[in-house]
Amino acid sequence: MQIESITLVRHGMTKWADEGKHTSDTDIGLTSAGRADAEALWTAFENQGHFDGIYSSPLIRAHHTAILAGFAHPQLHDDLMEWRYGRYEGKTSQEIHKENPEWSIFRCGGPEGESPAEVTKRCDRLLHDWDTKGHKHVLCFAHGHILRALATRWLGLDLRFGDHLHLDPGSISRLAWEHDTPALHLWNYCPRYTHIGPGQSAQ
């Protein structure tokens, strides 16, 4: 694989995210707090070097986050859309667990939406596509569950590992290498809430 790093950015806060509702292809925008999350990303990327592939989910909450973070023209990629929850769209985890106490998106998928196998194929297709294009350093703006799934596939693990990864709105994570082994170099760094002292960086 030619890719040296993939930087993952989860979009800023939305009304549904704030209420704990699962949001896939319902195309809702950022709240004022979400816009502040996105604007705070700008300082983290100010001196971060060159990305030769910049992508965003086409959904407005991710695309708007990219623009506010200083990337006005990301390439929109359908495979970066959120995991489709099907019947669970707009429901909270508490509501879902009343129907299925053992439910986890990474183990069960979304009924009438996407299965873990389908999302695995989507993530593997993204990684293959970026590698085929010869990208070294990819930046992508997307959504919580698809980014956790993408990180899991970068590590070569079954999607069930995604249950162990937490990702906040307006966060930055980075996938790279530990020698020849795929690794997490940075996870869930939130510029809006994390102070960086003199001589330190978001890396």
Image (cartoon, rainbow, N blue to C red):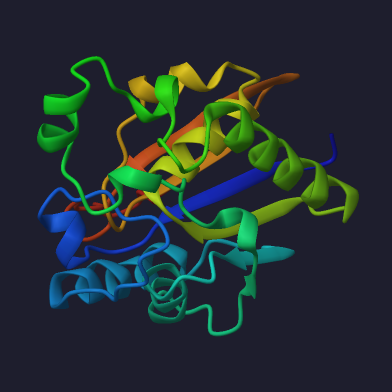
Tell me the quarter of the image containing the N terminus.
top right
Q: Determine the image quadrant of residue 118.
A: top right
Q: Residue at x 27, y 51 (%)?
A: 190
Left/right placement of residue 180 relative to residue 187 reads right
The answer to whether one can see residue 176 in this image is: no
In this picture, is 159 found above or below 80?
above
In this picture, is 168 found above or below 155?
below
The answer to whether one can see residue 64 in this image is: yes
Q: Nearer the viewer, residue 200 or 63?
A: 63
In this picture, is 137 found above or below 88?
below
Give the residue at the far bottom of this rendering: 72
Left/right placement of residue 166 relative to residue 101 reads right
Q: Residue at x 42, y 62 (%)?
A: 25
Total of numbered circles in the picture? 0
Give percent across and percent down for residue 47. Answer: 51, 67
Q: Residue at x 59, y 58 (%)?
A: 139
Give percent across and percent down for residue 149. Answer: 51, 34
Give percent across and percent down for residue 180. Answer: 75, 19
Q: Determine the image quadrant of residue 133.
A: bottom right
Q: Residue at x 45, y 41 (%)?
A: 112
Q: Nearer the viewer, residue 189 or 34?
A: 34
Give percent across and percent down for residue 120. Answer: 63, 31
Q: Nearer the viewer, residue 164 or 3?
A: 164
In this picture, is 13 found above or below 175?
below
Q: Nearer the viewer, residue 189 or 9?
A: 9
